[in-house]
Amino acid sequence: MFKKNLLLACTTLISCAPLFAEDEVTRGGCKKFNSVRVCNNLTVGGSETVSGSVTAGSFILSSGDTLFNGLRNWAVFSNDGAITGPGTETILWDGAPAFTPKGISNNVGEITLPTTGTFLVMYTIRLTIAGTTALETAIAHLRQSTVAGGGGMTNITQAAITNNSNNLPADVLELQTQLSGYALITTTSTVNNVIDLTINLPAAGITIPVATTPDANAQLTILQLN
């Protein structure tokens, strides 16, 4: 019987995932370890309390979904120079933004997003109208690349306000108005991870003024959701 029990114990130990305890300290009859190293999988049947930090590549729910655990990457860009129109131009963003981007870069108006991920992109454009004598329409386009390296820019296909227009009144001395929009953008590779924002200004006298610190006249905010 003793040999049978010993054999069963050895078999159990071999089949279990190796677990190593280091720096054992005995206090009040209990054994505490400063660190525990698990070589394979570890299943905890009850609750687990961690007083320190937990580092992991990802957290998976029982449903199989990845747990959202804070923002991965983000950026807030403000316009650099003024845009005077008329015509369609890509909005240029300040190369030294007030908030340092994380994982997102700007190159002369082309914004490169990490791959892969889903991003909430929000924009606001403030227009100054002065000297127009006819009813005009300004249009903003949020675009996404279809060719690696930022080529083939086209209006995004995800549900969003992709074409945002504003009818501008005629016969005004001067006023300001805003265009704003948003999109959920998904990137899967370097083919579709570049975005930009363009503005069509239909006539002279309708402009996006140059930013005056700390006030911007166009802003792009990007938050990576997963």
Image (spheres, rainbow, N blue to C red):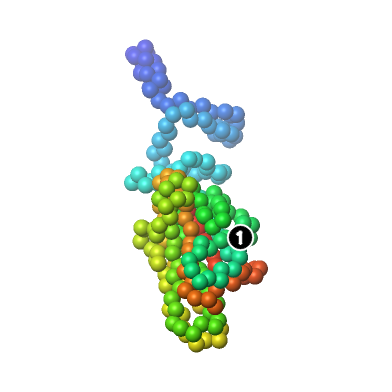
At x 43%, y 59%, the residue is 143
Front residue of this view, candidates 54 and 166: 166
- Whether residue 67 is visible to the viewer of this picture, yes or no, is no
Position of 18 relative to 166 (above/below): above
Residue at point 45%, 46% (across, down): 148
Q: Residue 7: x, y in percent?
A: 37, 15
Q: Position of residue 19 (x, y in %)?
A: 48, 27
Mark 1 surroundings: few (<14), some (14-19) or many (≥20) residues within 10 A: many
Is 205 or 177 nearer to us in this picture?
Answer: 205
Which residue position is annotated with label 1? 94
**What is the quadrant of the N terminus in the image?**
top left
Return the x and y of residue 100 as percentages of the image width and height. 61, 55
Amino acid tagged 1: Asp
Report the number of discs: 1
From the viewer's perspective, tell me whether residue 188 is left or right of residue 24.
left
**Can you say whether 174 is above or below 154 in the image?**
below
Residue at the farthest top position: 3
Q: Position of residue 192 (x, y in %)?
A: 42, 49
Which residue is depicted at the point 46% across and 60% down?
Answer: 121
Q: Residue at x 34, y 14 (%)?
A: 4
* 40 up-or-down from 194: above or below: above
Q: Nearer the viewer, residue 91 or 36?
A: 91
Q: Could you say which is closer to the camera, residue 209 or residue 219?
A: 209
Report helix, strand or loop for mark 1: loop
